[in-house]
Amino acid sequence: MAKLTSKARNKLPKSDFALPAERKYPVNNKSHARNAKSRASEMEHKGKLSPSAKAKIDAKADRILGKKK
């Protein structure tokens, strides 16, 4: 996965995040989109992320990855 420094992350627009209000799960490229899907799945399994939030993250990441429903 491409390195995303704090400085570069802070410069990303909200539209580059799967949860833009919280600026969580950056999906600015395919590598980060795949990682966001993986981390969201982990957090849902641990009970730290709701299924609806995971669905939002997956949908945004799938758009970046070019996957269709």
Image (spheres, rainbow, N blue to C red):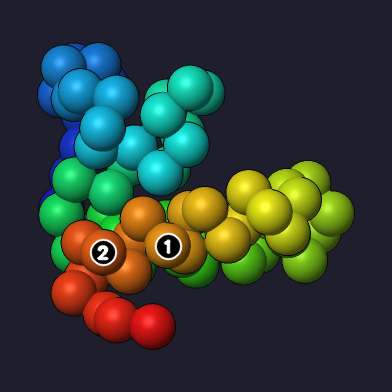
Q: Quadrant of the N terminus?
A: bottom left
* Occupied quadrant, residue 41: bottom right
Q: Is residue 64 above or below residue 11?
A: below
Name the spot of residue 58 as percent of width and height, x first: 47, 64
Tell me if mark 2 has few (under 14), some (14-19) or many (20+) residues whose alpha carbon lies within 10 angstroms of its own. some
Q: Which residue has dot 2 on it?
A: 63
Helix, strand or loop for disc 1:
helix
Question: Badges 2 and 1: C-beta atoms under 8 Å apart?
Answer: yes
Picture disc at residue 59? 1
Residue 25, located in which quarter of the rendered image? top left
Q: Amino acid at mark 2?
A: Arg
Q: Residue at x 73, y 59 (%)?
A: 51
- Horizontally, residue 60 falls left or right of residue 40, namely left
Q: Is residue 16 visible?
A: yes
Determine if residue 31 is in view: no
**Percent of width and height locating residue 47:** 84, 54
Q: Which residue is rendered at x = 51% and y = 23% of the image?
A: 22
Secondary structure at numbered mark 2: helix
The foreground one among 3 and 19 is 19
Residue 23, labelled with which disc?
none
Q: Residue furthest toward the right?
A: 47
Residue 8 coordinates in the image, percent (x, y): 15, 24
Quadrant of the drawing holding the C terminus: bottom left
Please state which of residues 68 and 9 is positioned toward the viewer in this rendering: 68
User: Would residue 34 be found to the left or right of residue 65 on screen?
Assistant: right
Image coords of residue 56 (percent x, y): 52, 53
Q: Residue at x 61, y 57 (%)?
A: 54
The furthest residue to the front = 69
Residue type at tag 1: Ala
Q: CA distance from mark 2 to mark 1?
A: 6 Å
Q: Residues within 10 Å of mark 1 (few under 14, many from 20)?
A: some
